[in-house]
Amino acid sequence: MRIPSYIYLYDGGKSKSLKLESILEYLKNIFRKSKIQIREEFITYYIKNSNSSEKEITHLAREMAEIKVRKIENRNAEFEPLPGEIEYEKRRLSESSNKSFGILYDGFELITTLSKLISKEESGLNHCHIIFTNQLFATWDEDDKRYHARVSVYGFPSIISTTGLVEALAKPRGFYLKKQMGIDVNVLKQEFVTRIIEYDDPRMTELMKRYVMQAIFYHTTGNLFCEDKICCLYNAHWQEDVIQTQLQLCHKHKEIVDQISQFKQGG
Ligand SMILES: [Zn+2]
């Protein structure tokens, strides 16, 4: 297993309760030899550092407008983005304080678009880029022929969405049932507080650590997800599972993590 020498965390989650310093400390204890760095929001960082021209920003805005998911049930729907859509993206790209996230992007296309911004020097596998964003993205599911919103998509770079953590994972069935029965949502949120995740959830930072671990494991091994439900590298679909398992590891992954952090105990 070749651990990347550099891990970059981009701070674009725009959630008050997401503290990247805490994630950095957590990673430092495991990946002791890697240099881990927190950077500002990904696109802002690259626009600043590459001195992007107006033309390049317009080009990026156009690409962003092109990778919007237009129809949940049609993967190949091709649309020419409207000038207003490109303008909207341009505004969003140039105002780093902009918090809007009303658009759903194709997750893999988003990774491709963002990867083009990474400099050559930081493009090898020795560099692991993990982007926190509040944008919502989805991936196409061949089985039921539709897009599904995701918390994360792994690749080069990997993207993790704070909005996805709230919107892409399922809440308990009882929550939806009671909501259908007309029970006030705020009352329900109280009742289900230990089983659902909300915007600016105080557990946000802790819950996000599993996704960072998944991103680094994917980057390092090329393997997606663990089969063991109790393991934080498992691909959980329910908010409840994410809350309950937190950072637990299965036997196999615990050994690997112990080895990496050189704290292997026993035989
Ligand atoms: Zn595992």
Image: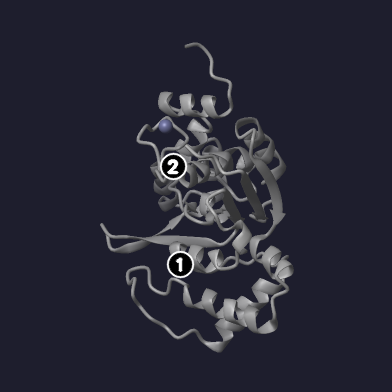
Q: Looking at this rendering, what residue extends furthest in the top direction?
A: 266
Mark 2: amino acid: Thr
Closest to the observer: 129 or 243?
A: 129
Q: Is residue 43 above or below residue 261?
A: below
Name the residue beneath numbered marker 2. 221
Q: Residue at x 69, y 66 (%)?
A: 44
Q: Which quadrant contains ligand 1? A: top left
Residue 64, image x and y in percent?
54, 74
What kind of element bears circle 2? helix
Residue 97 is labelled as none
- Mark 2 surroundings: few (<14), some (14-19) or many (≥20) residues within 10 A: few
What kind of element bears circle 1? helix
Quarter of the rendering containing residue 73:
bottom left
Asked which colour scheme the image uses, the reply is one colour
Q: Looking at this rendering, what residue extends furthest in the left direction?
A: 143
Residue 109 is labelled as 1
Residue 19 visible somewhere in the drawing: no
Q: Is residue 10 above or below residue 227?
A: below
Q: Which badge, 1 or 2, is on the more N-terminal residue?
A: 1
Tell me whether the residue at label 1 lies in contact with that at label 2, contact meaning CB atoms closer than 8 angstroms. Answer: no
Mark 1: amino acid: Glu
Disc number lying in front (1 or 2): 2
Residue 34 visible somewhere in the drawing: yes
Residue 126, image x and y in percent?
56, 48
Closest to the observer: 250 or 46?
A: 46
- Count all numbered tags in the image, as a single digit: 2
